[in-house]
Structures are given as structure tokens and as C-alpha cells.
Image (cartoon, grey):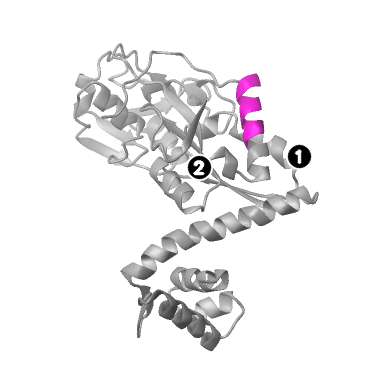
Amino acid sequence: MKLQQLRVLLAVAQHGSIHEAARSLHTTQPALSKAIAELERELGVTLMSRSTRGVSLTPYGAALVKRASVVEQELRHALEDIEAIRGHDEARLDIGFTAVASNGPLPEAMAAFRQRFPNVALRAFEMRPQQMLEGLREGRLDLGLISTCSGPGSNVFQWEPLFSVAMHLSVRAGHPLRRVRKLRPLLDADWLVLDPVDDPFSPLVSTMRLHGLEMPRRMVQSASNLLGLQLATQTDLVSMWSDAVFHGAGPLRLSGDALERLPITDELPDFEVYLVYRSADLMTHVCTEFVKEARHHARINPPWRAPRGACKAAD
């Protein structure tokens, strides 16, 4: 099995077309088809099925693509490390982060890193925790900043605590429920939900699970935090936000009293933000340097928090 054969397979899987894959690899369709045929003969299985609508992976092909993508990413990392040793800092660093994690040292770490490594292509993606874990597993991400109150997740990865942040239930100024002190009476209210309700890392899901309560019956879901803030301050939706909205310095911070924190006496979970990576030994040089920046800025400028006690781990 040759590396070029794996690259051909990955290209066809990505584009779903022999023609488009050949264009992306700057080769001819016959040469690409030959490489796939040789790989199939070597393995003794059919990797792709062809139809008038294009090509699709067989179960054998899907299994090989899953592993081949990791191999290709590791090769890219190895080449980048070699360039770093030679004194060149041209590389790429792909980082995933949750909305809660973005309110900590991430912007400062990125700015400091860019000053030191201006030629590195730094790419940051706001993602759900499960998407990040999948990206790390498949080699599409170098590093994740994941927020959770359930403690470290899969032991396949390293989970390094970075900082904690308190969460608050909130309503618009003057809301008729602004003096409610318990969670249960809020279950019949209209809620704003910023995470999928089947996401075990969701702050709202974690809070309801902590108290043995069902999820609210009426919910408006938004994948955008900026839209969510507008809905939270202009409608009667109950919502959950981190300390950054009230005390931070970023774009999510609200001015004045547009949003009121509810005086909830029930325990609300603090969220831990973790640096998540596959292994320190497998980190590229630029990823190692970025992690140092993140640690440094978390230490010298810790995010604000109002501790309320630890939350229970997920079942």
C-alpha cells in the first residue's frame, strides 16, 4: 500500500467524483482509476461502487478512509515538524473551541501566537464538543478547547484543565419571572437553547440532569450566540449564559442591565474548559507553542468566575 494510493482514495471520498478528484490532485482520470484498482487488488476488496450519480464508498472503503485520513494528517504534521527544525515556521494549526471556551484566554493566546509565528496558517472553528472529538480522532483538528461540567471525557485523549467559568440563568430586564428563585417553576416558561438538546455537554442539559428535572417543554434553538443575545434581551425567553456576558471584555459582553441574572438558589454547575489533544508526544511544534500561550494567558489573566460548587459527573 502506497501513500499516494491513500491520497487518491481520500480525494475521491471527499469529492464523490473521479473527475473532481483527478482535478484536485492535478492528475488524469485514468491514472487515478488505475491507482484505486491497484489498491483494491492488493487488499482483495472493493473500495468504491460507481453509478451514474458518481462514486460512493463501500464499507471496506469507508473503514480505510477513516484510518487513511489520520495517516495523511500525521504525515503533514511530521513534515511541519521537519520544517520547524530547519528554522521555517510555515505550517497550519487547526483549533476547535466551544462558545464558552472562546471567552477565556483564547483570543489573547491567538494574538500572541500570531506575533511569534506570523507565517503559520491559524484556523479556529466554533464547534460542538462531539464534533471536536470526532475532528481530533480523525486528525482534522490539532487541538480542542472543550467546556463541560461532567469532567474529562473519552480517555482516548488528554484532557488538561485550563480555567473554570460560572453559568447564570437570565431573563430580559423587567421580565415577570425575574425574581424566581427555583428551577422547577421555570420549566413551563419559554426557553432559549444554544446547544442541541441531545448534547451531553450542554449547560442546560447538565443543569437539568443535576437536579433530576425534565428539559423545558417550550424551546427556541439558536446556533448563534450573537442572535441568542438579541433574543434573550428582546423577548421573554429564559436563557443560560456564562460570566463572560456580564463581566467579560469580548463581543458577547452586554452593557447596562439589558439582561438580569435570576436569583436562583438551586445549584448551577460551573463549567471547566479543557485543552483536549490526542497526545503531547504527537503534537506538532506549532501546536506545542500554542498550548504554552494558552496556559500562560489563562494563568496571568484568569477568566472571571463566581464559584458555586462542582457539578456531578455525567452518568
Q: Residue at x 59, y 26 (%)?
A: 249
Instruction: Specify the quadrant of the image occupied by residue 23.
Output: bottom right
Type of amino acid under label 2: Arg
Taking the image as drawn, is residue 162 in sight?
A: yes
Q: Does the magenta stretch mainly form a helix, a strand or a loop? A: helix
Q: Residue at x 70, y 38 (%)?
A: 113
Tag 1 secondary structure: helix
Q: Residue at x 46, y 68 (%)?
A: 14
Query: Is residue 287 inside the magenta stretch?
Result: no
Mark 2 and mark 1 lie on one chain; the one further toward the N terminus is 1
Tag 2 secondary structure: loop
Q: Nearer the viewer, residue 151 or 181?
A: 151
Q: Nearer the viewer, residue 14 or 30?
A: 30
Q: Where's residue 302, x and y in %? A: 58, 20
Question: Up-down: is 33 above or below 312?
Answer: below
Residue bearing the label numbered 2:
278
Q: Residue at x 49, y 60 (%)?
A: 69
Q: Where's residue 37, x and y in %? A: 45, 82
Q: Badge 2 local density, few (<14 within 10 Å), some, or many (20+)?
A: many
Q: Where's residue 165, x and y in %? A: 47, 22
What is the quadrant of the C terminus in the image?
Answer: top left
Question: Up-down: is 267 above or below 276?
Answer: above
Type of amino acid under label 1: Gln
Q: Badge 1 local density, few (<14 within 10 Å), some, or many (20+)?
A: few
Query: Is residue 295 inside the magenta stretch?
Result: yes
Q: Do callouts 2 and 1 mark residues in contact (Cβ within 8 Å)?
A: no
Taking the image as drawn, is residue 237 in sight?
A: no
Circle on res. 115: 1
The stretch in magenta equals: 291-301
Instruction: State the CA–CA distance, disc 2 to disc 1.
Output: 26 Å
